[in-house]
Image: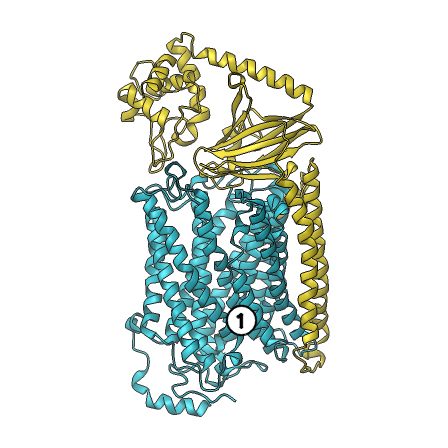
Chain colours: A cyan, B yellow
Amino acid sequence: MTTTTHDHDHDHEHHGPAKGLTRWLYTTNHKDIGTMYLWFSFAMFLLGGTFAMVIRAELFQPGLQLVQPEFFNQMTTMHGLIMVFGAVMPAFVGLANWMIPMMVGAPDMALPRMNNLSFWILPFAFAMLASTLFMEGGAPNFGWTFYAPLSTTYAPPSVTFFIFAVHIMGASSIMGAINIVATILNMRAPGMTLMKMPLFVWTWLITAYLLIAVMPVLAGVVTMMLMDIHFGTAFFNAAGGGSPVLFQHIFWFFGHPEVYIMILPAFGIVSAIIPAFARKQLFGYSSMVYATASIAFLSFIVWAHHMFTVGIPFLGEAFFMWATMLIAVPTGVKVFNWVTTMFRGSMTFETPMLFAICFVVLFTIGGFSGLMLAVAPADFQYHDTYFVVAHFHYVLVPGAVFSIMAGVYYWLPKWSGKMYNETLGKVHFWLSFIGVNVLFFPQHFLGLAGMPRRIPDYALQFADFNMVSSIGGFLFGASQLLFLYIVVHTIVAGKPAPAKPWEGAEGLEWTVDSPAPYHTFSTPPKID
Amino acid sequence: MKLQRVFIALTALLISSVARADWTLNMPRGVTDISQEVYGLHMLTLWVCVVIGVLVFGVMFYSMFKHRKSKGAVSSNFHESTKVELAWTLIPAAVIFAIGVKATYTLADMYNFEESEVTVEVVGYQWRWRYRYIDENAEKEVSFFSSLSTPRDEINNRLEKNENYLLEVDEPMVLPTGTKVRFLLSSADVIHSWWVPALAVKKDAIPGIVNEAWTIINEEGTYRGQCTELCGKDHGFMPVVVEAVSPEEFEQWLADKEQEAIELAELNDREWTFEELMARGEEVYGSACASCHQPNGSGVPGAFPALAGSPIALGPAEGHLDVVVNGVRGTAMAAYGDQLSDADIAAVITYERNAWGNDVGDMVTPVDVYNFKAGE
């Protein structure tokens, strides 16, 4: 395979990357665009992380020390929006751009120009969103879930910019998703049947369908807000015959699939890494595919579990409780599969594997608290407390974010042609692992003891665990600078990596050189 | 060396906080039958998770220690087994079914609003609660606001924080024990959520919607909670305090409050001097207006307009009355017409027109407020 790629390199010499800035502005190359997505998402990760540091610093002790409540609310809101839409989602799209064509044996994405557009509108969306911090009245301060009427009648003027930014992000996501579906369905190498695709490709195919289904719903709900604010409609205004609860139904019809959009690709990454370092094939490939599809289906019929306290009638409440608890079954199937794959394997624990194992354990803890939250009567006690904060941070940080880091360590040799420093990688892992648990585990206790989320100051009985949590937060935040150093150091001064640096790795991406040539699989590979 | 000092400082901080530690780990059992049931459900689900976790992670860590390459482990090649896969689908499904059945019974209990003896209306305002004890005789109806009573100086670290910091109010909700109390919840502005952990009652207060909840408190005592739905700037500063007393004490309290209501109504009818209005106005301003417009009337640029030197405060009294009584549509300025008594509105407007360098010099009386409202 290596030789074929060289032959084609020769044919396409005039197609090498352009020089300078125009390479990045005009590029239609999936690898360049993937790289830009990844760097962009990392920049957003640091920005959103900075906001989180402000939050944790204010919550270090009871009383108001650093910021006023107004600004604190802007911080929680911007932290959520930036992390969800700016860090986690673009990171997965970046990984998809880099890896999906190489995994299915395609020369590029199906719609390369649209690919360029879907990336390049993102910086504008986030520049606009971040600029609201400097506007009169401040940035959006109504939480990332922007419940009406706090986000409409009572919102600062910057809400209009927020709405426009969300529209752009949505357009970007929809274009990205269409591209991924088109690539997977049309551009697989001959012999690569659907049930032979790597799980990362499968999970992204399903994620892309979720995106296409729900991003228009998000666009719809922010447009209704825009109409309420500027054009006198009353979708969410009770005084005009509308309903604030309608907002929540529409938002969470988007919002619940959205949380699976942020975790399904993670399942795919972990399902690639664990078999590679256990040197043993995934225990149940097809049941993993079916479990992913079931989770995606269920994600559409559980939205109101975010709204157990809004006063849904008994039968509705019971339905959403049962449907939500049902999700534990396919999710369990996934976890059991990963564990069984490790069982009687021949394991080594390089950095990607450490992050992947940590993902399985801590994501499962987040899943456990998810099951607890699903129990509606108990949810009345958990709802909107730090228990919920702990829950979704466990699935998003040591869940989604750790899977992305695992993926970066796993594929970085392929992207850069260099090996990262294993010792530093492990140090980064252990610091992050300790930091993330010290940060989020005490938040379970805070929630159970009765601390509401999104408050800038708290009663004295919450003081101790908040301080512990903040210390964990600072440790976790600082460790990510080490991550930046490791990646830059690898690119600049890493040792050359072989085409397949991992003994047990499987898949087409390892059949091409490291770094992957600018154009791969111009002639489709043969799949047995 | 520097690092070491930081470390020592941090440790010292931690130890000092351990000394006054309150490391509560779990949900309170509460003081109602429902809250006990909820606690039971919580512990049941928690233990189910712990058992599953120990089994799954047990197998995982066993393999991580035994089946590592450095110990010479050779990977076997087994994969896919319908029996195993069926087992790990059906067994969790059965466990979940069991939890679900138990939870559904509790849920049904929580939705049984019938046969209540006392009904209290709870209305959320930015950022306080109004409690109204519903009575067939509207004349005697008891209704009051319950606002945070923690001094600003404690929040801003100028005073030592007291034991109930941020969980104390000027006037708590008083409820009888052993009596089924029904809550009707709504909101005057944004969504709030009324939560008392010890009662396991949490329900959203939503503008335009009336939600229901109920409780029967078994033990006398003071139970504290907070607003749990982000409702703007002072979301963290609108606690809920419920005082549960014996039914006899409750009757006495209610009778006292009814008497108080009659006396308050009389304030609207009496004659007021300028000084009296200014004094009462400053009080009302502090509790109702200062959190947005600031104690010195300077407002918050871009968010809340200043009152010192404002054209409305310096303009004709009708315009000022309109803003306070009717609010300003599309902004955070609420309509205070039905939140404050005529006397309080008169006092606060008089105060705003004559404080912080504003020197209109006129005086708005309760009668003016009454006439303004009637004239609309």
Q: Amino acid at mark 1?
A: Ile
Check the image and report above or below for A307 versus B207: below
Q: In terms of secondary structure, where does tag 1 sit?
A: helix
A512 and A323: which one is in front?
Answer: A323
B360 and B125: which one is in front?
Answer: B125
Indicate the quadrant where residue A137 lies: top left
| Whether residue B1 is visible | no
- Residue B218 position, x and y percent, is 71, 31
Indicate the quadrant where residue A352 lies: bottom right
Residue at 38%, 14% in the rendered image: B366
- Residue B162 position, x and y percent, is 60, 30
Residue, disc 1: A269
Q: Total label count?
A: 1
- Residue B106 position, x and y percent, is 67, 44
Indicate the quadrant where residue A275 lies: bottom right
A244 and A146: which one is in front?
Answer: A244
- Residue B16 position, x and y percent, is 65, 41
Q: Chain of mark 1?
A: A
